[in-house]
Image (cartoon, rainbow, N blue to C red):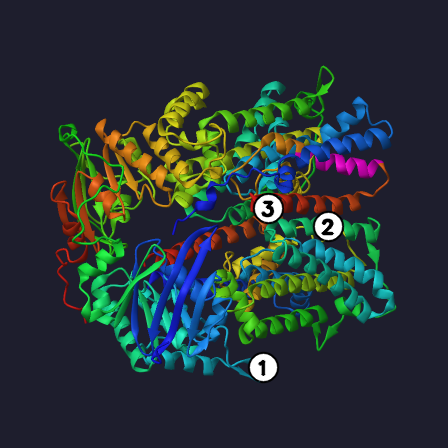
């Protein structure tokens, strides 16, 4: 096996392997690690990040980036909370709708006004955050407990948390779209070589438009779950979510330059980073060492560093291969 | 229109910003024919192809394809109508699988979802027609260039193309891969598909093409059967030289005083870097203008890049000023007293947002500063001197360089290196894209620089520039230096003959 | 093919986008001041000036480093985290938590030098990732964006460090002839950077790399070295800004120091007229950009518009500035 193949294999399966090793480690070391309570609480909490990371994954695969997902989730949570008295479905729809609005603005700025994704979504990040604060009057907005809205975040279905089911459904849809629709393949083609994609007759701008729209909608959905889970719309939540999502996507082996990516590996990336935090908690619980929760971002950064350097080597190799001719 | 003609283009005009790129050009291709399209840089072949594929809109003329008038406004539309183009820079998505690269844009579906097994089968089937068996699920980038090329062709055929245009498809292939490609082309021909083959390697044209069309200055010069035209005729038609024509004076170069030529400054032996430069040897003396002649793709620019340390040598060695010279990066060459005026002013030469003065001082600046602080006054003096000396037309040293004409930008770049007071100046196509007046000025400038003792290595695709300007001409052909002429021996006949035939490289037996 | 006959035509006619890209920020600033002079009460006072200047100081200091980075065609997302690191480290030193130093002046000096240098070293690390591994700047600096704040939090265990050390807090609270010291610091940094950019070889090379990296390399510019230095400078600026912030607050909270600073700095640079794609930069423009953003916010607040709405307006300004810039380029 050549080194480049090894590297690319590591790129695609490394994260799953690391996830399994981490789970094995936790199972052997801590008594309640694979207990029902721990599993459901990890899944319940990380489902929000999973949704945001899914949207981010699609955006990054086109070679773009969406920095607005964190504040969009915050906006979604506020809007959902405001509408929650009208019923669970209306609250859900309103939250997702708010996310779609932000996504629509991003999509328009990027594909119509041709503003760099990074600048465009940075601006909408501020705007969404400001709108959330305005709507919420600078405080958290309590949700209605009568309308059944909280079911979306707090209840279980067939023994598993509803947020986890929602995230799972989103990932299944995402996986099908990416692998079995021409739009999905177009996403990867646009990220891999936008000019070639246009030459091949694919609607590059429409694909990019859809991707930003979807990312906004998923962030809004994450916001709905946030509000339902914690019983309040939280305008100042979501800070740093975009970076968590980017890190998860990258750790999952998706190239930040676009063109290569996997929905499944992104989910593994989210779980890896989430369980890492969980393991730290358990470790502290054991009292052997006391690694504060603050280590998690250091470790996340280290993970990101390793993956990014591996990716740089991989892509240096592939550009060298292209240059050969 | 000949009934055998698949494509016929007549009276095509195309202007860019008022400047004609094509004037009354014509081109026709028969069914099941392999047709070579050749010409110098700027002859109009790319423009012609782009007009055909709808990339550019023509200003005048008629196009008929498959018996009907042909009007398309985009390459996609052309593809849907049976004309596929395979570009020089392979236009595929390297990270994606071969299947995707072949099937993108016309996917197979089952119940609304992509039917991968059917698509894999189709990709395999298309490639098998060329006897290529590969795992079509693997990303394209894992395969060599020849396979990528075949994938591009398979994609074109998958769209049931009637005409496939190949723009320099062999420039990156080795001999064995070229053989595979030729088999594919012959097979296409048998199936009644026509191929337009753009290449600068004359031997290849004879190996695979039926007819050839030669273009020059936006016009169609001639169309002939390959077996009825000599290589030397191809070259002279491309360059616009008549072999019998008497020598005239077409450039601003004038006779040189041979006594001003000094000792050997740079000598290079058997330089090589892969396919494109295989075995190049030459030397330059102080005060001498050495010219590199050759067709496109002969390896002239690539050799110059080796000298300047932009690319690293794989084999061979250089001596400079009597010592072994092995530059690792451009700054090594600059430190040794070299300058390099690139052929690609826009992407490698000017810094568009910077002023004339800043551009001109870019290389010299570190020398003209005291502890990192720029000596504005000294710089200003130098810049103003060169603006005057080189006759740069600008509103002043502070004008943005992007606002200048091509000729004046070139002079700014010349100034950048002359300010360094170099010993060797490499000029790659110093007068390309420059209007006639400025061209003459730059040519006389080059001569006077040599008179002052500067060694000049001049690469030019204009034959008269090399022949009249250079004291010695080195001819490169397919990566090999095949001939050297001194001023007296460098006649157009002789140089063109070497460009066309040269000493053909020893072709190794095709590897199994 | 390199036919470029059209390059000859100089833009002679008046181009509104080019004009706006050049002078838009200045005009906006003047209009804002005029508006406030007419409509905002007590605007023309030293008090107002000081409030606005001190609000903008740390942003400008960070944005100066960011301008240099962006001028090379890069970006530095880690500045906020580096502020947190230097802000966390300095009190640990002058409060004697690491090694006790008797003389408070010496302790403060050591604290300042060490913490700013550490931030500079982290910046150098960013530059190393970018120059040696050819990693996109946005990704390379994302690493320290995430890990950097974590490092600061781990160092302090997430605890708030409070202190009352006037010798140190002078950089945030002190005044010289009635002018806040931080304003003086800002002015010095701005002038120094503007001078470096205009008058030194290093400055020209920064612009040349951002304008055309290939051309710069072929002209003998040591591209990797320049990039390393630029990111190191950005780190140093962030380090200094971190110290100013904790001095003002009399406390250092690793969770809060420099939070969101990267966005404010980038916004100031963009509104100031520096090309986000590199190759054209103005330090004075960055100063004006930061002041414009601040003054918009002040104007809105002073006239009863909530802070949250000001965020939305700020977003609009950024998009507008970048859009005008792009139009100006497309028309030129």
Q: From which residue to which does the magenta span run?
A: C289-302
Tag 1, which secondary structure? loop
Residue B29, located in which quarter of the rendered image? bottom left
Pointer 2: what residue? A127
In this figure, which residue is indicated by the disc labeled 3?
C326
Q: CA distance from mark 1 to mark 2?
A: 38 Å
Residue B335, given in percent of the width and then of the height, sits at 29, 31
- Measure the alpha-carbon separation of dots 3 and 1: 41 Å
Q: Which of the two discs, 3 and 2, sits closer to the camera?
A: 3
Pick whichever, C320 or C95, lies toward us: C320
Q: Position of residue A47 (x, y in %)?
A: 66, 65
Number of dots carrying numbers:
3
Question: In the rendered image of this protein, does residue B107 appear above or below residue C76?
Answer: below
Q: Nearer the viewer, residue B109 or B156?
A: B156
Q: Secondary structure at mark 3?
A: helix
The residue tagged 1 is B112
Callout 2: residue from which chain? A
Q: Position of residue A266 (x, y in %)?
A: 56, 64
């Amino acid at each position: 096996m050549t080194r480049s193949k090894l590297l690319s294999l590591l790129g695609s399966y490394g994260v799953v392997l690391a996830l399994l090793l981490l789970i094995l480690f936790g199972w052997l070391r801590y008594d309640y690690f694979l207990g029902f309570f721990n599993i459901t609480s990890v899944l319940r909490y990380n489902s929000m990040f999973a949704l945001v990371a899914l949207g981010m994954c699609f955006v990054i695969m086109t070679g773009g980036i969406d920095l607005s997902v964190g504040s969009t989730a915050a906006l979604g949570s506020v809007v959902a909370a405001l509408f929650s008295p009208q019923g669970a479905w209306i609250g859900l729809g309103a939250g997702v709708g708010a996310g779609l609005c932000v996504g629509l603005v991003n999509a328009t700025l990027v594909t119509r006004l041709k503003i760099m994704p990074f600048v465009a979504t940075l601006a909408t990040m501020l705007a969404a955050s400001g709108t959330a604060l305005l709507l919420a009057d600078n405080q958290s907005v309590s949700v209605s407990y009568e309308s059944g809205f909280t079911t979306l975040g707090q209840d279980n279905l067939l023994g598993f948390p509803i947020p986890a089911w929602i995230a799972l459904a989103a990932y299944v849809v995402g996986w099908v779209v990416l692998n079995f629709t021409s739009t999905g393949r177009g996403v990867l083609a646009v990220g891999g070589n936008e000019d070639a994609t246009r030459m091949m007759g694919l609607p590059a701008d429409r694909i990019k438009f859809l991707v930003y729209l979807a990312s906004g909608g998923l962030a809004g959905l994450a916001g709905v779950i946030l509000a339902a889970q914690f019983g309040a719309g939280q305008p100042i939540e979501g800070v740093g979510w975009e970076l968590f999502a980017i890190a998860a996507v990258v750790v999952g082996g998706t190239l930040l330059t676009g063109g290569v990516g996997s929905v499944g590996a992104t989910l593994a990336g989210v779980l890896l980073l989430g369980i890492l935090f969980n393991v730290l908690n358990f470790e502290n619980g054991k009292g052997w060492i006391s690694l504060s929760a603050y280590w998690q971002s250091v470790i996340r950064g280290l993970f990101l560093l390793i993956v990014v350097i591996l990716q740089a080597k991989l892509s240096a190799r592939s550009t060298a291969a292209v240059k050969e001719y | 229109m000949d009934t055998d003609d698949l494509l016929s283009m007549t009276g095509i005009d195309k202007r860019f910003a008022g400047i004609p790129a094509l004037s009354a050009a014509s081109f026709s291709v028969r069914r099941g024919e392999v047709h070579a399209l050749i010409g110098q840089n700027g002859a109009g072949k790319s423009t012609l192809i782009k007009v055909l594929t709808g990339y550019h809109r023509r200003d005048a003329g008629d196009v008929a394809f498959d018996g009907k008038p042909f009007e398309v406004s985009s390459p996609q539309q052309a593809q849907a109508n049976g004309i596929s183009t395979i570009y020089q820079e392979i236009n595929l998505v390297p990270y994606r699988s071969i299947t995707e690269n072949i099937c993108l844009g016309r996917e197979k579906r089952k119940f609304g979802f992509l039917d991968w097994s059917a698509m894999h089968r189709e990709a395999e089937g298309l490639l098998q027609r060329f006897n290529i068996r590969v795992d079509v699920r693997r990303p394209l980038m894992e395969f060599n260039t020849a396979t990528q090329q075949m994938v591009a062709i398979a994609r074109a055929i998958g769209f049931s193309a009637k005409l496939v245009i190949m723009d320099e498809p062999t420039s990156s292939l080795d001999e064995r891969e070229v053989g595979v490609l030729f088999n594919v082309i012959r097979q296409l021909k048998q199936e009644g598909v026509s191929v337009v083959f753009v290449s600068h390697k004359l031997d290849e044209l004879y190996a695979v093409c039926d007819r050839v069309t030669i273009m020059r200055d936006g016009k169609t010069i001639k169309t002939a059967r390959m077996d009825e035209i000599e290589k030397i005729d191809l070259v002279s038609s491309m360059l616009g030289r008549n072999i019998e024509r008497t020598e005239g004076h077409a450039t601003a170069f004038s006779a040189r005083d041979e006594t001003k030529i000094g000792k050997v400054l740079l000598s290079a032996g058997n330089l090589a870097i892969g396919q494109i430069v295989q075995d190049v040897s030459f030397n330059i003396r102080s005060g001498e203008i050495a010219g590199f002649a050759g067709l496109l793709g002969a390896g002239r620019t690539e050799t110059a890049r080796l000298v300047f340390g932009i690319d690293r040598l794989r084999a061979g060695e250089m001596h400079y000023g009597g010592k072994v010279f092995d530059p690792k990066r451009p700054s090594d060459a600059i430190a040794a007293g070299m300058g390099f005026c690139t052929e690609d002013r826009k992407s490698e030469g000017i810094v568009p947002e910077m002023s004339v003065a800043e551009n001109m001082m870019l290389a010299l600046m570190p020398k003209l500063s005291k502890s990192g602080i720029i000596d504005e006054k000294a710089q200003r003096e130098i810049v103003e001197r060169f603006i005057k000396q080189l006759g740069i037309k600008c509103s002043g040293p502070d004008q943005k360089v992007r606002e200048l004409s091509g000729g004046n930008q070139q002079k700014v770049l010349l100034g950048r290196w002359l300010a360094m007071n170099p010993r060797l100046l490499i000029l790659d196509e110093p007068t390309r894209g420059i209007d006639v007046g400025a061209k003459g000025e730059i040519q006389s400038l080059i001569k006077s620089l040599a008179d002052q003792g500067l060694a000049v290595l001049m690469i030019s695709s204009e034959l008269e520039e090399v022949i009249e300007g250079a004291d010695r001409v080195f001819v490169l052909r397919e990566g090999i230096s095949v001939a050297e002429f001194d001023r007296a021996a460098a006649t157009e006949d002789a140089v063109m003959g070497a460009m066309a035939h040269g000493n053909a490289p020893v072709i190794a037996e095709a590897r199994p | 093919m390199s036919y470029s006959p059209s390059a000859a035509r100089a833009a002679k006619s008046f181009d509104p986008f080019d004009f706006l890209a050049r002078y838009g920020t200045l005009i906006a600033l003047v209009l804002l001041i005029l508006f406030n002079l007419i409509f905002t009460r007590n605007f023309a006072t030293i008090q107002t000036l000081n409030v606005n200047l001190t609000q903008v100081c740390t942003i400008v200091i960070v944005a100066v480093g960011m301008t240099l980075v962006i001028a090379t065609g890069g970006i530095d997302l880690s500045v906020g985290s580096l502020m947190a690191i230097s802000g966390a480290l300095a009190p640990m030193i002058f409060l004697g938590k690491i090694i006790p130093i008797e003389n408070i002046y010496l302790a403060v000096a050591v604290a300042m030098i060490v913490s700013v240098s550490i931030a500079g070293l982290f910046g150098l690390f960013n530059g190393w990732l970018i120059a040696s591994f050819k990693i996109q700047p946005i990704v390379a600096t994302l690493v320290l964006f995430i890990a950097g704040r974590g490092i600061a939090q781990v160092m302090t265990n997430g605890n708030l460090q409070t202190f009352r050390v006037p010798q140190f807090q002078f950089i945030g609270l002190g005044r010289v002839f009635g002018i806040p010291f931080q304003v003086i610091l800002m002015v010095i940094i701005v002038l120094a950077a503007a001078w470096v950019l205009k008058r030194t070889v290093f400055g020209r090379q920064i612009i040349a790399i951002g304008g055309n990296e290939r051309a710069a390399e072929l002209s003998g510019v040591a591209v990797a070295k320049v990039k390393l230095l630029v990111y190191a400078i950005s780190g140093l600026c962030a380090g200094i800004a971190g110290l100013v912030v904790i001095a003002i607050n009399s406390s250092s909270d690793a969770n809060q120091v420099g939070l969101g600073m990267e966005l404010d700095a980038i916004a100031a640079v963009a509104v100031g007229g520096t090309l986000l794609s590199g190759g054209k930069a103005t330090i004075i423009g960055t100063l004006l950009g930061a002041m414009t953003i601040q003054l918009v916010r002040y104007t809105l607040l002073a006239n009863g518009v909530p802070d949250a709405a000001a965020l939305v307006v700020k977003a609009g300004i950024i998009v507008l500035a970048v859009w005008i810039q792009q139009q100006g380029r497309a028309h030129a």
